[in-house]
Amino acid sequence: MKSFLRVVFIYSAKDKGLSQITKYMVGLLENAGHTVKTIEVEDVTSPISLRPFDLIFIGARVVSTWGGKISQEVVNFVQGVNGMEGKRSVAYIKPGLFSTDKALRRLMSQMESRGAFVVDFEAVKGEKEAKQLIERHITK
């Protein structure tokens, strides 16, 4: 019996490339029959609970060339969100020229500080990596 997941994608919409990749991944999950919600961190005005979701994807953009910093809007959202404790989660970023690994580690650290279990992570350059990331989480 196939089980369907309730998935949420949390991402920064400021980066058009990250938005396109996120929408592509959302489409793959919806086509597989899963329920998907998207949250653009720039549009959030009240606290949000992630308790209803089985799997949490958080995407960020790299905002510094050398420091591996991620978008502050994502950091602020993760610090203020409820219900990440014990949740399976996936970190993904749209890689920059440098410091991609450092940015991924920073995002995962933020997620883990809120109690999330980061089960996967990826620097998603395009549709190929996005599809591979989603396929690792779709129950066949």
Image (cartoon, helix red, strand yellow):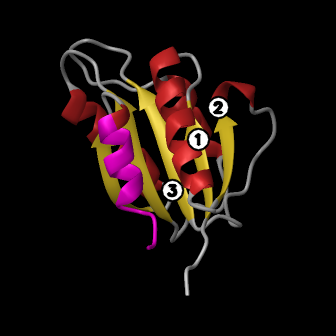
| 84 is higher (above) or lower (below) than 61 | below
Q: Quadrant of the image for the N terminus?
A: bottom right
Crowd band around label 1 with a 10 angstrom C-alpha radius: few (<14), some (14–19), many (20+): many
Provide the major secondary structure of the magenta segment: helix
Magenta stretch contains residue 138: yes
The segment highlighted magenta reads: 128-140
The residue that disc 3 covers is 114
Q: Amino acid at mark 3?
A: Arg
Which residue is located at x 43 percent, y 45 percent?
110
- Residue 118: image x %, image y %? 38, 59
| Label whose residue precedes the other's in the sequence (1 or 2) | 1
Q: In the image, what residue occupies the spot 18% across and 18% down? A: 98
Residue at (45, 72) in percent of width and height: 139
Residue 3: in magenta span = no
Residue tagged 2: 41
The reply, left or right, for residue 66 in relation to residue 57 is left
Give above or below for 56 relative to 66: below
Q: Amino acid at mark 2?
A: Val
Relative image position of residue 61 (x, y in whole percent): 42, 24
Callout 3: SS: loop
First in sequence, mark 3 or 1: give its number. Answer: 1
Q: Are marks 1 and 2 in contact (CB under 8 Å)?
A: yes
Q: CA distance from mark 2 to mark 3?
A: 16 Å
Q: Position of residue 138 (x, y in %)?
A: 45, 64
